Amino acid sequence: MEWKQEYKQTMHWNGTISHREAKEAVAAKLAALAKDGDVIGFGSGSTSLLAAEAIARRVREEGLRIIAVPTSQEMEIHCSNWGIPTATLLSVRPDWCFDGADEVDPHGWLVKGRGGAMYREKLVMAACPKRYILIDDSKRVSQICEKFSIPVECQCQSVNYVREQLFTLGADRVEMRLAKAKDGPVITEFGNFILDAHFNKVPETLERDMKAIVGVVETGLFIGFDPIVLCS
């Protein structure tokens, strides 16, 4: 038995999608790679949403059989509404995954997590043998933290300690991320807070050093994943 369509939760992207034409072009490139029977990690964010929509059209029009491993509750709802079966890493390992990025440097290092889903995104990316990152030219930077800070997900009671330790690692600015539709901080899907830490210089050891801080759950700095970058 299925939910009536009119009762299904509908979700729309919050605000205008910037560089939409370019993002739709790279989303189409990604969707063309999907094959019947693939298990795919579905990323989060606006570009991933457009790519997921393009895959959903192929599922609908071509009868493509796809299993999605979503990286956020938002993407789970979209997949449900589009009729794409979902699974978790407990039951399947994705053949490949796609995701967006807030920054990509010449080494393939990434900053992710403006949507707050970097923990699940990194779990899925680590599990995949092949990873695609979908960007437009605005996401290319010469060095990390050129445009955005690095999100650091931390346990709620640890925020003051973690903030202090981030400064000892060289951060020049650390701010708690505040919600826009509720009072107080952003709460992640795992019930944690997010600190946005800006560094003028990002050494290769920074991800490891941040995760060594007691109370840090995950960071939005993705190093060593060697992604295939698809750009419009």
Image (tube, rainbow, N blue to C red):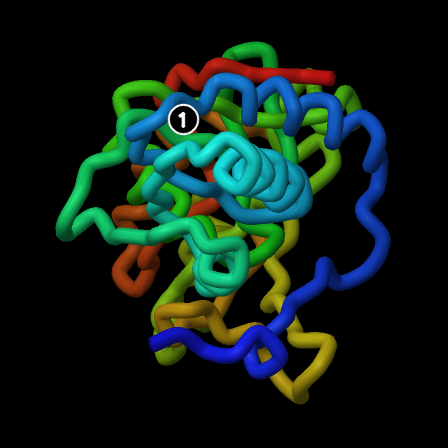
Residue at (65%, 24%) from the top-left corner? 28
x then y, percent, for residue 2: 40, 74
Rate crowding at label 1 as few (under 14), some (14 to 19) or many (20 or more) other CA atoms within 10 Å. Answer: some
The mark total stands at: 1
Residue type pointed to by label 1: Ile
Res 80 → quadrant: bottom left
The correct choice, above or below, for 35 with respect to 71 in the image is above
Q: Which residue is mark 1?
A: 223
| Front one among 199 and 59 | 59
Residue at (77%, 20%) from the top-left corner? 137
x then y, percent, for residue 200: 64, 33
Mark 1 residue element: loop
x then y, percent, for residue 56: 54, 42
> Residue at the left extreme?
91
- Asked whether residue 171 is in view, the answer is no
x then y, percent, for residue 180: 73, 76
| Front one among 80 and 135 | 80
Image check: 218 left or right of 202?
left
> Quarter holding the N terminus?
bottom left
> Quarter holding the C terminus?
top right
The correct choice, above or below, for 187 with respect to 95 in the image is below
- Asked whether residue 169 is in view, the answer is yes
The correct choice, above or below, for 63 with respect to 8 in the image is above
Residue at (34%, 19%) from the top-left corner? 130
> Residue at the top extreme?
106
Residue at (44%, 18%) from the top-left corner? 227
